[in-house]
Image: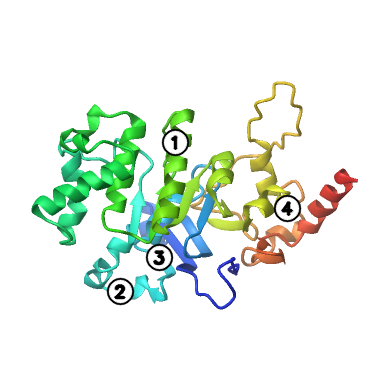
Amino acid sequence: MSVDNDAGADDEPLVKIEGLKKHYSTDEGLLDRIIGDPQSVKAVDGVDLEIAEGETLGLVGESGCGKSSLGRTMLGLEEPTDGSVYYDGVDLTELSSSELRDYRKDLQFVFQNPFASLNPRLTVSDIVGEALDVHGLAEGGEREERVEELLETVGLQSSHASRYPHEFSGGQRQRIGIARALAVDPEFIVCDEPVSALDVSVQAQILNLLEDLQEEFGLSYLFIAHDLSVVEHIADRIAVMYLGEIVEVGTTEEIFSPPYHPYTRALLSAIPEPDPLWEGDRIILEGTVPSPINPPSGCKFHTRCPIAHDECAEWNDHPDLEAVGGQHSIACPFHEEIEDEVDAAAD
């Protein structure tokens, strides 16, 4: 189930994914070959999402829940196991490699590690200008001018074009990565934890830059992060992911005040507070995250859920997202128990 957004009831979302799955095959052992039952890692396991034009959708969850795999599969960097990815009404999963190439410049990616994602053997001019060369957008003097313009747009100097990645700080390298993504005038950018490797002070600068660029160029973002305080700052809506599935989605205000899925509540309770005298209720989840190779039956969260019922493990499939008002949807049929608890605490 997908959730409508503020773009309007009659407006199609810019990006829409339906039933998206990405399973990675594990190395087959002798037993697998004998019984013919090779295993797979279910990194993304049936996700529905919509992203409106000009919107930032935050995607949060624990490490290993499938956030990055979802982002990479959406842009065709990974081939989906099943499902559809629509961009401006076109199903990208049905396109050939040559047809998909025409859409590459509209869909870009900003990687998590700003050093590993930049070729150390190339100058900044070559890194940023490579996309211009591939798509035939500029050459010669026009190419140089475009590269310098992009560097200045992201807060660097045009003279930096002749330098190499190792000559820059982490924040500057991430600005180079953003300039590379902007080079082809994209409409949609997947930002895969773009500030997690940066100092806190630099994180704020990059977040502000992304917001300024969105306003200037009308960009849409999928912003992947594990830090909910960062996502709260930049996202219009938030989707919460657990073990390859979306368990809650809504506007930032709906997710934070308050969330009703027990997993989201646990994530929010883990956000550090700057007040040393703060004595909030930290929710500690029991057990460990199940293996994505052999996830639990029914609701995948039931093995760690503080309100789990017997039937949570008996469903043939995971619970669907259920609308609970506004743009807020929850994949938990027992969420009313948490609502009652929140209401009782407020009285």
The residue wearing badge 1 is 205
Report how far apart the C-alphas of labels 3 and 1 lie in the structure.
37 Å
Report how far apart the C-alphas of labels 2 and 1 lie in the structure.
38 Å
Query: What amino acid is labelled 4 in the image?
Result: Tyr
| Front residue of 140 and 4 | 140
Report how far apart the C-alphas of labels 3 and 4 lie in the structure.
31 Å
Which label's residue is closer to the chain start, 1 or 4?
A: 1
Query: What amino acid is labelled 1 in the image?
Result: Gln
Report how far apart the C-alphas of labels 1 and 4 lie in the structure.
32 Å
The residue wearing badge 2 is 95
- Residue 101 is left or right of residue 154, and the answer is left
The residue wearing badge 4 is 260
Q: Are marks 3 and 1 in contact (CB under 8 Å)?
A: no
Residue 279, horizontal then vertical, whole percent = 76, 27
Report how far apart the C-alphas of labels 2 and 3 lie in the structure.
15 Å
Which label's residue is closer to the chain start, 2 or 3?
A: 3
Q: Is residue 86 above or below residue 191?
A: below
Which label's residue is closer to the chain start, 3 or 4?
A: 3
Number of residues whose C-alpha sits closer than 10 Å to that of mark 3, classed few (under 14), some (14–19) or many (20 or more): some
Number of residues whose C-alpha sits closer than 10 Å to that of mark 1, classed few (under 14), some (14–19) or many (20 or more): some
Q: Is residue 309 above or below residue 153?
A: below
Q: Quadrant of residue 23?
A: bottom left
The residue wearing badge 3 is 81
Closer mark to the observer between disc 3 and disc 4: 4
Residue 296, horizontal then vertical, whole percent = 60, 54
